[in-house]
Amino acid sequence: MSSKRALLIYVAVAASIFGAVWGASALTAETKRQVFGFVGVSAMPFAFADTEAVLAWLDCYRAGRDMRQPCDFGYSHFPLTYPKTWLALAALPIGWKHAWPVAVIMESLLFLVTVLLVLPYPRAAAWPALGALASPPLLLALERANTDIWVLLLLYLACVAGCWAGAALIVVAGTLKVYPVAALASILDDRKRTWVAVALAALLFAGFCVTPLANWSEVLGSNLAYLSTTSSFGHQVLPEILNDSLSKRGVRIEPLLRVGAIMIFLGLLISTPWLARCLPSAGALATERDRRLIICAMAMFLISFAVGRNYDYKHIHLLLAIPALSAIAAQRRWICLEGLFLALLLAALWLTYDGNHTASRATQELVEWLLVPLSGVLLVQNLPGRMRGWWGALPVKVRLFNIRAETY
């Protein structure tokens, strides 16, 4: 198949997916629930619920309501759970009644970005990208018009922009959702100005934290401890299944299981330097743009796996890396680390999650646990040479109080 034909197929099928989501969102609540339920998506009774909730917060803010209480505008009635940065949008003439146009514009931009990501490698990337885009988790993100789509758009611009602009865009994304700050790893290279950009980004982020729009004590204090122990990707289903099984025998060790899951996650991260030297990878074939996209996507996956809510649409950030990984893997006939990662990722995306702690959900979580060390390895292997050598040398030699790094 020619590259031009592969690209046309991708554009046509992807446009059909977006159009189908928009069309289904216009149906009545019951019909919409049945249509989305057929493809494994638990739909809300009203369209684009997450975008509608953010826009309703703007109405509440302009009306002087207490943002810590459920909002009485719109349909969702959620209290403010995001950083107050979103409230800066109250200066715009938009509210909860504009959920449709705002969501369609946001998702149209996402469609454009996916086309730009696939454009350099249509023959290799079209089908894996479509396989991810049509999966239940990403359809859920489109059905909800989830605000992580805005984060993805900012991160894409950061990866294709220069060092300084990239750092600034990542900081903006970080002030919207906090955890995208991990994507600063994508702008690291061997030049001194990169470190200056990272330092300025850190100062800018610290400066934001003391502004009236900063509410980190509310966002982090009320959510982080809960999320990291009961609602993150790797800490939820498997510990509960084991705990339920043991509780029938009069044994309850749920807190120990949570701690154990966290320790396993940290152990997998620590092991990535050794795995990076052992697993076959074709990462040397990546361009500078590809490296940034892969590092950004892997950093986002790891941080959301560790502390993110257990909603599968967090996988949407991996769209940034799927075309580049597909192009690299295709050059090695898919027998390499990148090919293995893509196979496991698509398996995780297509394992149906119906909201219950079922065997299929446990299987999906096991696959995601396998993705953790692989994503860490891909992140390390795509770091610039000096950074990669420094990271890989950390566990090599510790003599008294001196750590001597060796280059591999």
Image: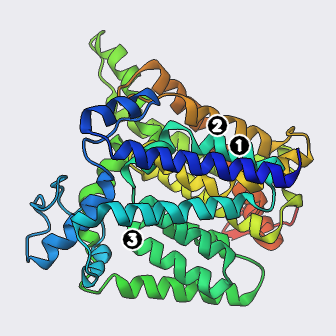
**Residue contact at pointers 1 and 2, CB within 8 angstroms:** yes
Amino acid at the residue labelled 1:
Pro
Please give the name of the residue rendered at 78% of the width and 46% of the height, measured from the top-left corner: 338
Q: Which residue is mark 2?
A: 346
x, y percent for residue 219: 27, 64
Q: Position of residue 24 (x, y in %)?
A: 39, 42
Which numbered disc flags the more N-terminal residue, 1 or 2? 1
In front: label 1 or label 3: 1
Q: Which dot, 1 or 2, sits closer to the camera?
A: 1
- Kindly tell me whether residue 86 is visible in this rendering: yes
Vertical relation: 246 (above or below) 202: above
Q: Residues within 10 Å of mark 2 (few under 14, many from 20)?
A: some
The amino acid pointed to by label 2 is Leu
Q: Nearer the viewer, residue 286 or 326?
A: 326
Residue 216: x %, y % from top left: 29, 71
* Marks 1/2: CA–CA distance: 8 Å
Q: Which residue shows up at 62% across the image and 53% down it?
A: 319
Tag 1 residue: 128
